[in-house]
Image (cartoon, rainbow, N blue to C red):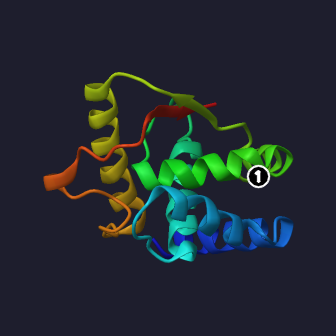
Amino acid sequence: MMRNEQVISQQMTWWLEREPSLLNKLIRDLQERFDSLPVTDLLMRECLKFLFIAGTVEQDKPREKFTPSLIVDEVWHCLILHTQSYALFCQQFYGDFIHHHPGGDEQDNLRQLQKTMYALQQQFGPLDSTVWPTDAVLDITGQCSSCDT
């Protein structure tokens, strides 16, 4: 798991060097939509963890589809709006563009969110409940169904 955390730290540094105002933009955008927010640095790291599981492919296996939590989805939207940086990030770290698919069936999204949370726990350990829903509140899935390349 330590290696994965190092990748996330490297990606965080990459983004902040390339888009120095990114965290401030995140704060402004997210404060409009959410009453309370976890630390923005944490939100960015959780989004990068999501992209890590979405972008990583085991040899000879197809890429799986994952669904973000609502707040991680909002952070992902912010990254995608930096189109050149996002495309370069995907290519540099994952070898292909990680596409975003809005919408989707609510039950499919819920199943994919549960699969996402399981994959995140396998790669990074316990989830932060301020970012990822607990079993009691799994109705706060992102409004976007999945990602793929």
On screen, residue 128 versus residue 58, left or right, reads left
Residue at the location (82% across, 52% down)? 85
Q: Residue furthest top?
A: 105
Helix, strand, or loop for circle 1?
A: helix
Looking at the rendered image, the quarter that the N terminus falls into is bottom left
Q: Residue at x 42, y 61 (%)?
A: 123
The image shows residue 147, relative to residue 41, as above or below, that is: above
Give the residue displayed 30% in from the left and 47% down from the top: 140
Q: Position of residue 20 (x, y in %)?
A: 81, 72
Q: Label 1: few (<14), some or many (≥20) within 10 Å?
A: many
Q: How many marks?
A: 1
Q: Which quarter of the picture shows residue 106?
A: top left
Residue 71 visible within the image: yes
| Relative depth, front residue between 141 and 45 | 141
Q: Residue at x 49, y 63 (%)?
A: 46
Amino acid on which the number 1 mark rests in the picture? Phe
Residue 94, x across and y down, in percent:
69, 47
- Residue for badge 1: 89
Q: Residue furthest left?
A: 136
Q: Nearer the viewer, residue 67 or 78?
A: 78
Q: Is residue 64 visible?
A: no
Residue 78: where, in percent of width, then height? 66, 52
**Nearest to the observer: residue 132 or residue 5:** 132
Quadrant of residue 22 in the image? bottom right
